[in-house]
Amino acid sequence: MRDVAVIGVGMTKWGELWEKSLRTNFVETALLAIEDAGVDRIDSMIVGCMSSGIFTGQEHLASLLADYLGKTPVPAARVESACASGGLALRQGFIEVASGMSDIVLVGGIEKMTDVNGHEATFALGTAADQEYEGYHGLTFPALYAMMAVAHMHQHGTTREQLAMVAVKNHANGSKNPLAQYPFKISVDDVLCSVLVADPLRILDCSPITDGAAAVILCPADMARSMKKPAVRIIGTGQATDTIALSSRKDLTWMESTHVAAGKALEMAGLAVKDIDLFEVHDCFTIAEIMITEALGIAGKGRGGRAVEEGLTAVDGKFPVNPSGGLKAKGHPVGATGVAQAVEVVKQLRGEAADRQVKNARRGLTQNMGGTGGSSVIHIFEAD
Amino acid sequence: MPTPSRYWREIPQRYRFEAGKCRSCGYVCFPPRLVCPRCGAREFEDIRLAEAGSLVSFTVIRVAPHAFVDQSPYAVGIADLDDGTRLTAQIVDCDFEDLKVGLRVKLEFRKIYEEGETGVIYYGYKFVPE
């Protein structure tokens, strides 16, 4: 297997981009990554997207995007794993370069979510749950995470304020990210006074509906060293699944797929979690970040709420989590999120993260998941 | 929207609470499956779920998918049934303030929602406080 490096990253401002089409938004981002890498040759494209069929009525996405990028006849494939589609696209791109099948691979992530109304978006996102079981009874994603939160509060004494502190931290980080959808600070009171979505989760506990795209360029590490930008190698990748229905799990408060995927990625990299300098994780809801910090081993089981309260996961804490602002403040265009996490970590490891730079960052980890943790994808990056 | 035939095939589980019990290890699968997730065996017997249990978690949904907009806000929960199976369903005929972990609930046959254009009514089970 060949060593793989990221040589280019691209991302545009996220938000409610009514003036941009799905394909325009993707192509803009891909061109930024191509320019950043300083290459014009693309051997293959992998695109992560969850639900363009429901959100925009558009399928056959990978070929469409290769066409609009002016890269036909390169091979292009779309991968889907709900909100982990972007992370899975990165993993497939990694496998393609590592195997020797292709040298220069463009990995993109995209979602255009604001062309439908809120109830339709809620339905589209809900398709990541078991539609003939959980969906049939009117379950939504905020509801499933709310039930994890209620169980976590009941079993581990996690407080409503600790949930809010995740959002406050990530908005503070996101206020320094000019590409974030919501680059402003909020307070614990703001969260506690915001409108209820699914008790006890309020709107400021939830990541937003977002239009956005992100792209990276991968190539063999040997080739990367002669390129324009400092290379960042991907030294570990791990993926795992779990039951789709939340009720099929013994413990509603534990993210087993993240735990298993992280173990695989860390083993591949030959590292322990203490060796990682920063984390970009899937805080689709505040309770999610708390459970992920436990699954990764940053906080002990049941102690994720205390970890955020004690500042362990702050940018200047022992384990900086979501310096980009996370899904909460940066936005969550579901298929693009996993790729954007890689964009942030690469910028951090190159020292290009400006005001939100984590000091002396050499290694970073991304954690991207689908559904209620029915899938998880982890990558570990190291400055070359 | 899906066609009615998609729902006919779900009738044994939705109307009669039927689950599959693994003949090898005894694990109860709901919804029923072809492969036991615990031991990998493929032989099951049809059993009927217990019709009461206790809530292990719950929430009140205030932003609903389009088919459920008219019902919003509504409560949903996960309960451990008395036979050890864990089940998800709506919780009805209760005040939201009375919801708590450990609340005893029973399963009742109810209307889930109706599909506007064809007027098809979909049925299933819901939790009702005991």
Image (spheres, rainbow, N blue to C red):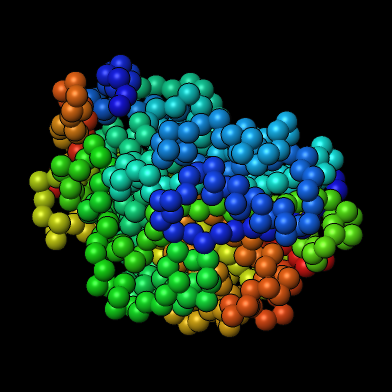
Q: Residue B119's image quarter?
A: top left
Left or right: B125 as drawn, with respect to B84: left
Instruction: Establish if A276 lies above or below B98.
Output: below
Q: Residue B19's image quarter?
A: top left
Quarter occupied by the N terminus of chain A? top right
Q: Which residue is drawn at 84% across and 51% down?
A: A220
Left or right: B91 as drawn, with respect to A366: left
Left or right: A325 as drawn, with respect to A33: left
Quarter occupied by the C terminus of chain A? bottom right
- Out of A78 and A25, give the one closest to the viewer: A25
Q: Which residue is drawn at 32% across and 24% down?
A: B2
Q: Residue at x 57, y 47 (%)?
A: A26
Q: Residue at x 49, y 66 (%)?
A: A180
| Residue A255: image location, x then y, percent | 50, 55
- Out of A62 and A31, give the one closest to the viewer: A31
| Residue A245: image location, x then y, percent | 41, 41
- Out of A205 and A212, give the one closest to the viewer: A212
Q: Residue B114's image quarter?
A: top left
| Residue A107: image location, x then y, percent | 67, 47
How many dots with numbers?
Answer: 0
Instruction: Establish if A118 lies above or below A294.
Output: above
Can the viewer see residue B127? no
| Residue B12: image location, x then y, percent | 29, 21
Left or right: B53 as drawn, with respect to A362: left
Can the viewer see residue A23? yes
